[in-house]
Image (spheres, rainbow, N blue to C red):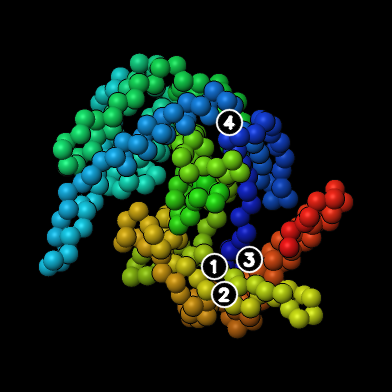
Amino acid sequence: MSALGIEVPETLAQLMPKHELRSSKGTTGEGRARLTIDDLPKAEERESRRISSAVDAFINGVKFPEVEVSPGVMAEKAPEFRISATGPFAGVDAAVVTNRSFPVFSKVFGFAADPKATAETEIVIEAVGAVGSPAPLRIKLGRVPWLGGKNTPMRRRLDSFLDGFDRKEVVVKPSGPAFHSGYGVRFFRKELRAEIYGHALALAGNPFMTQDGVVLADSRVESAELYRGGRKMETTLRVLASRTPWDGYAGSDVFARVGPYGSPTTAEALDPRDNATVEPWQDLLTEWRKAGWLDAASERALDAEVRALGAKALEAIDGNEKKLKSEKRARGAPGPT
């Protein structure tokens, strides 16, 4: 898919909150650094979850007034949270988050992982306009293991990963059964190490993170160029793949998600105006061909390659399932059906 610069993202880092710490670093054929982190040490995990639990209880315990959105229809006012910090951050404007979702966690841990943070730093969360004017939540950092983002195993390994990273941007995102719709997905310039670290901590200690959940730091993959109303867009593809009657694999259908550049392509964006739309794959191919980026031959080649990738992905999944089944049979345990 080199005609449009489309590429398959490769996982460059994993942070798992429940397993023994180990790391491996190498280089792919394209010269990218790779780091795998399989753990938050117990002290880091404990403090991350303590702070996450306090934040989660606060933002979900606040009620906002209802407003009339149409005659006879009442809806809750969009929540607004202000996150600030004391000490070295006293002159920094409070961050305003107008959603109950992950940005509150990310801002809190961003302060905590900032190199300027100290044991005396207090993070303050206010619910602006909430019913009953609840008292702000105040979290004094004390001497948490990752204070200021210095000299912790996770930070050292994350630095090692970024030292060898040859791209300009990193995407940090959660993976697990409770995460979906772009929750917790953020893009960072690679030099923003404290912010990247804070975001990874927030994800690893998030209430939604399960035993088998992971935090992934990947290369930021540039979408093929696409504009809507003069606005640059992100494009991701979904490929429907299936087994064939002759025991093969085929990519049978494709559709695209198109959303604003710099945001996850999800239908449930933090700002509804940024919701991605579903578009036919053929419409994008036609648009790129009209723009002169594809000709008839490269359009056919790109379509075939996308479908083949879907088939290869399904074949790999199926092969792994067969391997697991064989291993369980060898141990005398029932395998997956």
Which of the pair 156/183 is nearer the observer? Answer: 183
Identify the secondary structure beneath mark 2. Answer: strand
What's under tag 3, amino acid-wise? Ser
Identify the secondary structure beneath mark 3. Answer: helix
For marks 2 and 1 on the same chain, the one whose residue lies earlier in the sequence: 1
Which labelled disc corresponds to residue 40?
A: 4
Where in the figure is residue 184, as x and y percent of width and height? 45, 47
Q: Is residue 48 left or right of residue 159?
A: left
Q: Quadrant of residue 195?
A: top left
Which of the pair 274/316 is nearer the observer? Answer: 316
For marks 2 and 4 on the same chain, the one whose residue lies earlier in the sequence: 4
Identify the secondary structure beneath mark 1. Answer: strand
For marks 2 and 3 on the same chain, the one whose residue lies earlier in the sequence: 3
Q: Badge 1 is on which residue?
A: 237
What's under tag 1, amino acid-wise? Leu
Residue positioned most to the left: 71
Q: Do tag 2 and tag 1 residues touch (Cβ < 8 Å)?
A: yes
Residue at 44% in and 72% down: 278
Q: Badge 3 is on which residue?
A: 2
In the picture shown, does residue 43 fall above or below 102? above
Comparing labels 3 and 4, the label whose residue is closer to the camera: 4
Separation of marks 3 and 4 at Cα, in angstroms: 37 Å
Q: Badge 2 is on which residue?
A: 254
Residue at 25% in and 26% down: 91
In the picture shown, does residue 258 fall above or below 84? below
Q: Quadrant of the C terminus?
A: bottom right
Separation of marks 2 and 3 at Cα, in angstroms: 18 Å
Separation of marks 1 and 3 at Cα, in angstroms: 15 Å
Separation of marks 2 and 4 at Cα, in angstroms: 38 Å
Which of the pair 331/5 is nearer the observer? Answer: 331
What's under tag 4, amino acid-wise? Leu
